[in-house]
Image: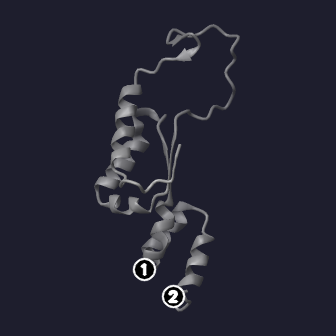
């Protein structure tokens, strides 16, 4: 593959559809790493609903450990606030003790918001085109 022209190599790399495969390409050679990194970091999707915000903390640690320089390639950042539910909740049931007016009260919002703010602060100015 390395004997092919760069534009052909890039077309091949763009057809890779998983982050794990792009990461594997980055580990094969410096040349493929240079071509693959912008695609690997183009879209960042982070979960904020997991217990202890492990996903956010792990991302922040990897960025602090040196991956932060690659955030300049990021164009789309999204945060997933709600855990995907396996079954819809009924609005006909009584609210539990930790609800008020039908909305769940999560005492962990402050910690989550602090983690989100720290992650946002790691991105270079004017690199994001999409934020959700």
Residue at (51, 66) in percent of width and height: 39
Res 72 quadrant in image = bottom left
**Disc 2, SS:** loop
Q: Return the residue at label 2.
A: 2
> Which of the image's four quarters has the N terminus?
bottom right
Compared across the picture, whether 48 is left or right of 94 comes to: left
Q: Is residue 125 above or below residue 117?
A: below
Q: Position of residue 132 (x, y in %)?
A: 53, 43
Q: Nearer the viewer, residue 129 or 4?
A: 129
Q: Is residue 50 above or below residue 108?
A: below
Compared across the picture, whether 87 is left or right of 8 comes to: right
Task: For marks 1 and 2, give the CA distance.
Answer: 9 Å
Q: Position of residue 55 (x, y in %)?
A: 43, 43
Res 84 quadrant in image = top right
Q: Return the residue at label 1.
A: 29
Do the numbered discs 1 and 2 sit on residues whose CB atoms are within 8 Å? yes
Q: Is residue 111 above or below residue 119?
A: above
Residue at (52, 67) in percent of width and height: 22
Q: Nearer the viewer, residue 118 or 127?
A: 127
Q: Position of residue 4 (x, y in %)?
A: 56, 90
Q: Residues within 10 Å of mark 2 (few under 14, many from 20)?
A: few
Residue at (35, 48) in percent of width and height: 60
Q: Is residue 75 above or below residue 121?
A: below
Furthest residue in direction front, as rendered: 126
Q: Position of residue 25 (x, y in %)?
A: 49, 73
**Disc 1, SS:** loop
Furthest residue in direction left, as rendered: 65
Q: Residues within 10 Å of mark 1 (few under 14, many from 20)?
A: few
Residue at (40, 40) in percent of width and height: 54
Compared across the picture, whether 110 is left or right of 22 comes to: left
Mark found first going from the N terminus, 1 or 2: 2
Res 51 quadrant in image = top left
């Amino acid at each position: 593959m390395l004997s092919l022209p760069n534009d052909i190599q890039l077309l091949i790399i763009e057809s890779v559809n998983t982050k794990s495969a792009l990461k594997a390409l980055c580990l094969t050679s410096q040349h493929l790493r240079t071509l693959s990194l912008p695609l690997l970091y183009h879209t960042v999707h982070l979960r904020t609903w997991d217990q202890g915000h492990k996903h956010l903390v792990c991302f922040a640690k990897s960025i602090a450990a040196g991956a932060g320089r690659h955030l300049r390639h990021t164009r789309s950042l999204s945060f997933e606030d709600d855990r995907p539910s396996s079954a819809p909740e009924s609005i006909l049931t009584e609210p539990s003790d930790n609800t008020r007016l039908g909305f769940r009260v999560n005492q962990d919002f402050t910690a989550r918001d602090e983690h989100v703010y720290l992650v946002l602060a790691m991105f270079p100015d004017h690199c994001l085109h999409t934020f959700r």
